[in-house]
Image (tube, coloured by chain):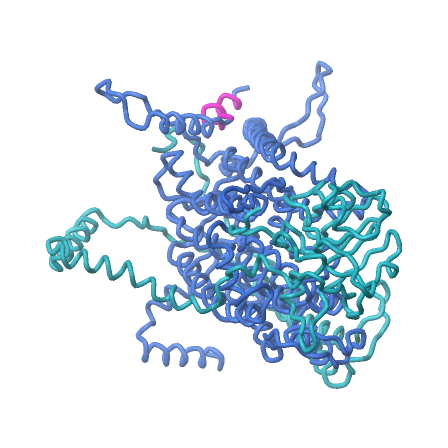
Chain colours: A blue, B cyan
Amino acid sequence: MSSGEKVAGSVANYVDERTGAAKWLKKNLTKVFPDHWSFMLGEIALYSFIILLLTGTFLTFWFDPSQREVIYHGSYLPLNGIHMSAAYDSTLHISFDVRGGLLMRQIHHWAALLFMSSIVAHMLRVFFTGAFRKPREFNWIIGIGLLTLGIVEGFLGYSLPDDLLSGTGIRIAEAIIQAIPIVGSYLSFFAFGGPFPGTSFIPRIFTVHVLLLPGIFLALITVHLMLVWYQKHTQYPGPGRTEKNVIGYPLMPVYMAKAGGFFFVVFGITAFLGAVASINPIWLYGPYTPGQISAGSQPDWYMGWLDGLVRMAPPIETHAFHHTISWNILIPGVIVPGIFFTFLALYPFIESWMSNDKREHHLLDRPRNAPNRTALGAFGITFMLVTLANGGNDLIATHFSLSINQITWMSRIGILVLPPLAFFVTKRLCLSLQRADRELVLHGKETGRLVLLPHGEFVEVHEPLTDAEAWTLTQHEQLPALELPEVDAHGVRRPGGLRNRFRTKVSRSNAEAIAKPKPDDLKEIEHH
Amino acid sequence: MSDKAPRLSDPGLPEHVHRKADSDPAAAKKAERQVAILFTLSALGTILFIYSYIWVHTDRFIFIPIMGDQNASQLGMGIGLTFSLLFIGMGAIHWAKTLMPDNEVVAERHEFRSEEADRQDFVATVKEQGAASGLGRRSLIKRSLGLSLGLIGLSPLLLLRDLGPLPKKSLEQTSWKTGTRLVIDPSGRPIKPSDLEVGAVAQVLPELAPGQERTLENVGKDAVLLIRLRPEEFELSPERLSWTYQGIIAFSKICTHMGCAVALYEQQTKHLLCPCHQSTFDVPRAAKVIFGPAARPLPQLAITVDSEGYLVAQKPFTEAVGPSFWERSS
């Protein structure tokens, strides 16, 4: 026995004698996790969160979350003698006078972008593979909660330095609050401690940014991971993989080394970005004042879609009975995002209701085998991309010498036309891919080898798939459409006729598929 | 509900393929060396980090091709940290992939639904224990508890009331009064019509009374943009024309959409553009909205000159400036 093993043994013994956890730990330390690159996306989000906690804590040691007015006398000379808030002053101090301060600020910001990107990528993976289905609906909802809070947390974070760009973002947020009917002005005055901008907002959002939201994140992430642990990870279909098992590597030592190592890789990549790629150079923007603005104002990317929606909104306000309703703010700023996120959160229940599928699912779908869901995802992505592009309409206009009015009009039309188009195209693509799978299983792979037959005909040799490959392409279910007759067995009209007709229609559309090869089909081919 | 159609047969988990390092001690030794090299590179990265922190001054710049002049301290620390982190990670992953066991393990999964007997037992227990509390029978307790639980949420909400004052009329008021002088922002100098050539723009604020301090809240409502056109270029109603002075027209600089500063003036087209959401206002037509999400023109400030020839406000703004709010009456 090596000395390392001896130490490990006595540690295990020490822990067990005090907790009695030997059995539980043994079972869980060798817990099996399936391996796939797409399962790393959520891991990246977790690691960026840890990086955010570490770098963020460092930043709080110098950051002064106050809107008290000070005069700058630091080492960045262009701003010498300028009046500014203590928040902006201390951010300049971190950037120029604290060794490694700029590096930490940049790593923090890059990690925030990575956090949001990996959450979105992880969510898309879960969506397109159907991993949100029973029994994982709760975890999907927690995930949507994390995504939503992440957007808020990111916005608050980049608002803290109180520079001209972020102050403009706060002004816009204030206008959205103020636009809420009936209570808007009150909510705004409560949030800002009086008229905009006041001196209370930065200290308040600081507490929310560093205490309240990270605490909620920590709690939600813990539950999220515990559920993954308890419910066991989903796996992609393949030979030997069923709904009843999970195949992969044990946590100890393989995943501990791999996942632990991957944390350092993610940290290393954000450190590299922080070292070489300048992000949010607040010293170029100057301190915030409501009377000034920098051209080409852009939020971070995860807010860009919201800004894009606001930019394309029609100029509609209702003035009646001495009151005003700003539809040009409420529709893009509150109503559309509200519908989008509610639908997203409820999607597992909507899908289960429409397909009447109440079974557990642990094997993932290949996206092509769920054409309607995949097409719906493409609908959502296209919608977001149009809004995101319109969020940068001014930059597109200046970089490509285009008319900003035309770009905005293209987006206004595009937001209505392109998502349904994407739905249609994606659905057809999925069915085509199913057809290609069928071909592949029945006729094998093209080898590129041509053979001259005795009678002069050329044929290409096809190589049959291995059993494992054929199984992977055909293991999925092809469910028949729901039958919901309008009358029950006694000839009485069932209640909810309209609802049932809708469900039947959707379920018929869901059942649309290219029939996968059956064993008989393969046998028939072999005869030829 | 499930797919009953016959399927191909599942060939089962493919046979394990051994890695070179599993059987060949030389390959294993090589992999071990590779891992050790990666960890050593990480250590070197940390040394670079420490060196840059202690010995490289924060005001030293070095030229890097493509990237241009870079702060040496920031770059040295950043690259050092990158190496120290990245190579630890790569070493650990390489170790796991080449030398740790790579046998796939099969674990069983069980349906989460409990056995039927357990479920019924559970439901019965819940019912029984619930009945024991008597909540169903004692409706007085039930109702009063409902009332107290329903009201308890009010206390934390009430405590938030003192976060800020009530808006009252403050969203509708600015510092502009009849006769307030227009002063250039930021110099604070009063302005005469002759200071502004045709086509020129100036940002102005109301003159402060002696001893008065200007707050950002004031700027957020008082900021005004002066633009000088040729008087014949205006397409204004007689009333609005009387609010201009020798071709000088004054608008609130705060966008009627979301409150950004409407700062981009295009001299050729005489359009004012808000950089936030591209609302475009046509200056000769009293800042009428000609594009973008803003629904109202920028409020116009009536101006004239005082006895000393300085530009002053004829009267306060006749409507609220800035973005809309529920209580706004027009």
Magenta stretch, overall SS: helix
Q: Residue furthest bottom?
A: B54
Q: Residue furthest front?
A: B307
* B276 and A252: which is toward the camera: B276
* A37 and A336: which is toward the camera: A336
The answer to whether residue A506 is above or below residue A89 is above
* B250 and A145: which is toward the camera: B250
Image quarter hosting the C terminus of chain A: top right
Residue B95 lies left or right of residue B308; in this view the side is left
Residue A145 lies left or right of residue B262; in this view the side is left
* A276 and A72: which is toward the camera: A72
The answer to whether residue A326 is above or below residue A232 is above
Q: Provide residue B268's location: percent of width, then percent of height.
A: 86, 45
Q: Provide residue B91's location: percent of width, then percent of height.
A: 62, 68
Query: Which image quadrant is residue A417 in?
Result: top right
Q: Is residue B160 visible?
A: yes
Q: Is residue A117 magenta?
A: no
Q: Provide residue B145's location: percent of width, then percent of height.
A: 21, 60
The residue stretch that appears in magenta: A514-526
Q: Residue furthest top?
A: A455
Q: Name the residue located 63 percent from the left edge and 34 percent from the top edge.
A: A418
The answer to whether residue B282 is above or below residue A212 is above
Q: Is residue B43 visible?
A: no
